[in-house]
Amino acid sequence: MSATAHSVVEASPRTKAFAGTIVILYAVISIAPLLWIGATAFKSPSDSIAYPPKVFFKPTLEGYVNLFTVRSRQTPEFFANLPPAQTWWEKLVRSHDMVIAGPSKVVPRFMNSLIIGFGSTFLAVFLGTLTAYAFSRFRVPLADDLLFFILSTRMMPPIAVAIPIYLMYRELNLTDTHIGMILLYTAVNVSLAVWLLKGFIDEIPREYEEAALVDGYTRLQAFRKVVLPQAVTGIAATAIFCLIFSWNEYAFALLLTSGNAQTMPPFIPFIIGEGGQDWPAVAAATTLFLVPIVFFTIVLRKHLLRGITFGAVRK
Amino acid sequence: MDLVKRSPGRLAPGEILRSRKIAMTTYDHPETLVDRGAAQTPQRIAKRVRGISDRGIAWLFILPSIALLLAINIFPLIWAIRLSFTNFKSNLPYVPLKFVGLANYVDILTDEDIWHGMQVTARFVIWSIALQVVIGFGLALLINRQFRTHSFWTTVILLPMMLSPAVVGNFWTFLFQPQIGLFNYVISFFTGIPPSSFEMIGDVRLAPWAIVLVDTWMWAPYVMLICLAGLRSIPDYIYEAAEVDRASAWRQFWSITLPMVLPFLMLAVLFRAIENFKMFDMVNLLTSGGPGSTTELASITLKREAFEKWRSGYSSAFAIILFVTVFGAANIYVKALNKVKQR
């Protein structure tokens, strides 16, 4: 047999070229809407609704300025008495016969997303790590049933959960509070965290812990000093998945918050300008909101499969 | 350090030796034997040496999570079950509660609108999953050819599924705008149909397809990723053996590739079916059930009844019916999945 015998498994160059072309074509088409939104954020309102849709346009930061400010239209006399604009964004707003009346609500909403996202992620990963360790290492009575119970809480439609939660939170004065939303998201995330982390901890050989126990460590010490350091990658991946869930969640946020603890997803659709939705501002908010997710997706690439299947499929 | 302080002299005689022996002889099931070793040590000494018992730690570690789930998921569920037998309206909390028995359930199961909504949901679930399976599996087969730069493009394709469905639904309303939207423009560019002559989210015939289209855009990568794992789990030697037996490419696909990927594919379908049956956020922002009720999925009806009409009793009954449906269907499906896996 010659040295260049073709492998039956390796595809031929022609097949590869064909496969590559189709996949790249699909990828380009599927990413186009995202790029379009990213571009719309830099359009002026009139460019954003131009026909035919403009691929080439004069970029402006108007969308971002509009996103962060509340503006009011003024008369020429009013402008005559105003001191000259101090900053580039004031100039930009004044060139449309408007003045900045104050900051918009986007920064507090963004902060809410961060507070609730990180708060619930921290709690869910903390509780999840402990529970996953116990399920992984100890013989727990009814372990399979308990694990299934933990997973089954994810099967309920969020609206179905929201009806009694709404009444319960109203009684406890937790509606529209950060703590209420953090607890709720923690409960939803904890099931994911337990299932994912159990998979990760199962993969850590027990022998390390056994050795530590023999050397006189207590279980808790072995857990803290032997298991946790080895589970760090898994914990980080799990944390990112929890963070993404809390960040993206809409149904609970829509029904249980109205202002004080409202996160970005229910807020973005209500960014409006004069006469309808201000698309460049909406696109700017969408871009700012999605960029962290894109970043995390790239970071998580290797663990994505596990995360989206609750650890059922590991590569 | 702890290690030094806890000198062997303070252990029960033979303790270390015993545990060493255990660790050496029981390579396969170290857990049970260490447990047994711990059980053999007198309680008082074990406490001093090991801190709390393993069983204590197990419960200490598990109970907080279970308690949280009981408080946030199960207690409300029980509350909802109780409410579902009443005429409670949460905008009128002071009206005395009246138990109406099964009236809510009877109302729901005999209501034509509810059945219409269920049909809309079923059609959405079936079509979106069918498209996602075809596109996802197809892409996985192509990516598995391992052309150069395939891992970069895989990551690009995966992006949509990580995004917030609500935000996705919101920006697709922009892309679907009849005159100015990118989608209509591209369609008219390739087909010549004027872009303002059709409205994806305003037309009763097109709106159901608009939600299927956006859902497929988001989630075909999900099916793809799981199928790709399935394809990669097939060892090369099976194909080599088939090649030796001169099996055609077509035959190899039907006899090797498909059966071996099937459990993975079914898992993907299970997860998507549950998620799409519960679908709320993307569709609520894209069409909010309209036009008319052509895209009013079960969750959207539920939200209307519960949070616009405030019929808490009635909507709780509907919620319970939905939950039982998902739960029951998922259980049957998992059984089928296990059968496929065993083959």
Image (tube, coloured by chain):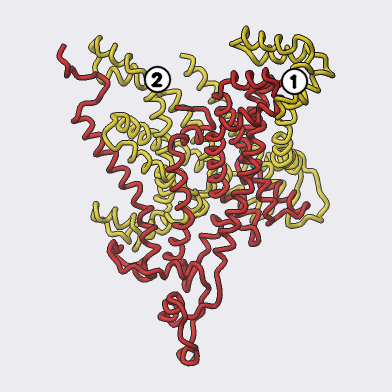
Chain colours: A red, B yellow
Question: In terms of image quadrants, where is residue B148?
Answer: top left
Q: Secondary structure at mark 2?
A: helix
Label 2 Cα crowd, 10 Å radius (few <14 / some 14-19 / many 20+): many
Residue found at x 69% / y 51%: A180
Residue drawn at (36%, 18%) of the image: B235
> Mark 1 falls within which chain?
B
Q: Position of residue A211 (x, y in %)?
A: 63, 19
Disc 2 sits on a residue from what chain? Answer: B
Q: Which residue is mark 1?
A: B7
Q: Are marks 1 and 2 in contact (CB under 8 Å)?
A: no
Query: Which residue occupies 51% across, 65% down?
Result: A271
**Residue bearing mark 2:** B260
Toward which corner of the image does residue A121 lie, by quadrant?
top right
- Compared to residue A259, the image places residue B323 above or below, namely above
Name the one closer to the observer, B212 or B246: B246
Tell me if A151 is positioned left or right of B261 in this view. right
Amino acid on which disc 2 is placed? Met
Q: Is residue A258 left or right of residue B156?
A: right
Distance from the alpha carbon under mark 1 to that under mark 2: 55 Å
In the picture shown, does residue A130 fall above or below A217? Answer: below
Side of B262 relative to A127 (left or right): left
